[in-house]
Image (tube, coloured by chain):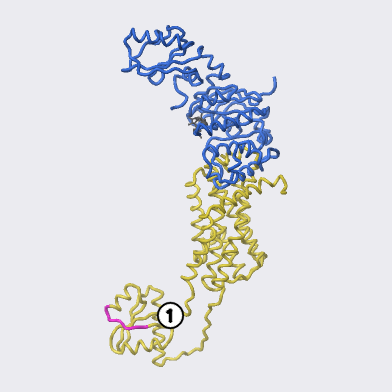
Chain colours: A yellow, B blue
Amino acid sequence: MADARVRPLIELAKWRTREFLRQPEAMFWVFAFPILLAFALGIAFQNRGAQTVHVVVEQGLNADALVETLIAAGGIEASVLAADEAQNALRTGRVPLVVVPGETLVFRYDSTREESLLARLVTNDALQRAEGRSDVRAVRNLGTSEPGARYIDFLIPGLLGLNIMGTGMWGVGFSIVRTRTQKLLKRFVATPMRKSHFLLGYMLSRLVFLVAEVAALVAFGHFVFGVPVRGSILALSVVSLLGALAFAGIGVLVASRAQTIEGVSGMMNLVMVPMWVLSGVFFSAAAFPDAMQPVIQALPLTALNDALRAVLLDGASLFALTGWLAILALWCVGSFGVALKIFRWS
Amino acid sequence: MSTPAVNCKGLVKRYGDVVAVDGLDLEIRVGECFGLLGPNGAGKTTTVEILQGLLPPDAGSVEVLGMRWENQERSLRERMGTQLQDTQLPDKLSVVEVLTLFRSFYRAGRPVEDVIDMVQLREKRDVWVKNLSGGQRQRLSVACSLVSDPEILFLDEPTTGLDPQSRHQLWRIIGDFRAGGGTILLTTHHMEEAERLCDRVAVIDHGKVIAQGSPRALIESLGAEHVVQFALANGDSIDHATLGSLPGVERVSAVDGRTQLTVMHVHEAVPALMTLLQQRRAELSELTTHHATLEDVFISLTGRHLRDG
Ligand SMILES: Nc1ncnc2c1ncn2[C@@H]1O[C@H](COP(=O)(O)OP(=O)(O)O)[C@@H](O)[C@H]1O
Ligand SMILES: [Mg+2]
């Protein structure tokens, strides 16, 4: 039998856990959705072997020979099209480059498109070599496509961070406000229930699902896409736990005064959407200007994502994660502390 | 005299320009069932929430079981039970789960299974709240306040919106609690409920107590036991002075286009009324009589009904 003093806490956590388990749509958003998203993005950005360049040769003298030469060079797909069709394909972006045969070869392309510039380089290179140009400096090509350096490897830890943020914020913030609008909160306050137990109950039930949530997504990434898990389970657990607590704290803070579901939803989005963009979920946070970096690095989701990547991809030890863990701990303590001060109990 | 269960003086609560509670004094004795009777918006909910330490009053003092909210909140909460108006209990918990949750908040109390029997929800023990009927939900709500085995129970409109059968079931639960020595403060705008359950009632209107006493005494204060109510065809009326001089008529009032006579004996007043109407050649469109109730007390005090319909 649990000690009488923690029984209310346990019962409150059981209440939260049951409500969650009995709500199929919540289960979907927490477990199925991130996996579906990871699957879709994983497929979309899968490495399709070596990349090839598509080129069109305009109909004309020796057009077929040009096509053969290009195909023989490897890495290039080429075909012949009538002049107007070729022009059309270029204009609509279906091909990056059109080669017009003749004494002087003409390359038609859009010089503002990266893909076109690449196609021009590759095509020019292939044709010049075929005519006998040789390289003056020896090089050796080493392509990287091993696990740990692909897009999916970048993506999975980002989605994990995103999911920990989303479930923490919604799971805690949203349901606190619902309890308030249903006057259930007031009903609880009329009992000797400790206010800290009420909030800790939410935190505790979050942790129950956190384990399942993290395990599901990491296992999915690992077994379906071969995303590495190089760090220790302990490090992964500590990072996830601190991340979840930080976002649960922010969830409580956002919910601390909101009187309506609409109000809290708006605030949640206000807090979360900037982090989706800034915190390196789908693309690296390094893409933003240096001036913004101090702010971006201080965001809890950035710290969580960086720490998760360090653990999963680089096998970082707990010690190496101290900086990120400190940021998460500060967010947790700070938001929870402020929330307790300003919380509206009715 | 022993310490009253509830003692409040000069309670005031304002919401902007609205004065919800306007200088209210109450003294509730240990072991009695006390009713706050008043129409919607009278300030009943505001008053009981202040008494339960859920709302700070703008002025006035509150003592419950001889203790004050400022310094003895926890021990007070251990000893009281509450049922608030409009609380929605967790939809997807079963009856026993909800009660176990509430029970865990209290150091001492009754076993959950006993409470389930007390409120007759044995068959619904494992049913989710959202699948309960309105009456069952309300019984569960009261049950949540019984798990602590409280000394005093605050019930805010416990039977509003319930069908007669569910209402009677709740009355029985409240009666049992009272019989076990508990003190009850309940609010209602249902006069029969107040008459049936309450030892004493305070009639409140616009945040003030306008009459107080046992239902019996309040009805007797009308000076007569029966009410004759009539209306005339074509919207005719007869001056109140003439009606007041009919034999046995204690009081005349007009409500909603009808005239109401409070009388000692129906068998004297009605024939006299008929004679009068005949002399005036007035035609009746309606005539009813009933035993005087708290509703009639309210009407005679305010000229309004307690509730519509
Ligand atoms: N939170 C509030 N904000 C503004 N006005 C309120 C609030 N609560 C109650 N009131 C007003 O105070 C008056 C008394 O309300 P209430 O105590 O709920 O009455 P009752 O319970 O008798 O129906 C009403 O006029 C109501 O509109
Ligand atoms: Mg009310």
Q: Quadrant of residue A106?
A: bottom left
Chain of the residue on which disc 1 is drawn: A
**The C terminus of chain A lies in which quarter of the figure?**
top right
Q: Is residue A233 above or below residue B72?
A: below
Pointer 1: residues within 10 angstroms few (<14), some, or many (20+)? few
Query: Residue at left 36%, top 11%?
Result: B238
Q: In the current view of this chain or complex, which residue is farthest to the left?
A: A84
Residue A15 % position (x, y): 60, 48
Q: Residue A8: in sight, yes or no?
A: yes
Q: Nearer the viewer, residue A114 or B260?
A: B260
Residue B36 % position (x, y): 55, 25
Q: Is residue B73 above or below residue A312?
A: above
The three-letter amino acid code for the residue at tag 1 is Thr
Q: Is residue A82 magenta?
A: yes
Judging by the rendered image, the residue that carries numbered circle 1 is A52
Q: Is residue A40 above or below residue B81?
A: below
Q: Is residue A224 left or right of residue B108?
A: left
Q: Quadrant of residue B96?
A: top right
Q: Is residue A210 above or below residue A126?
A: above
Residue B193 % position (x, y): 54, 26
SS of the residue at dot 1? loop
Q: Nearer the viewer, residue A43 or A19?
A: A19
Q: Residue A342: in sight, yes or no?
A: no
Residue B47 % position (x, y): 56, 29
Q: Is residue B4 left or right of residue A53?
A: right
Q: Is residue A63 magenta?
A: no
Q: Is residue A72 left or right of residue B88?
A: left
Q: Which residues are magenta?
A: A78-84
**Count the marks: how many?**
1
Q: Nearer the viewer, residue A336 or B167?
A: B167
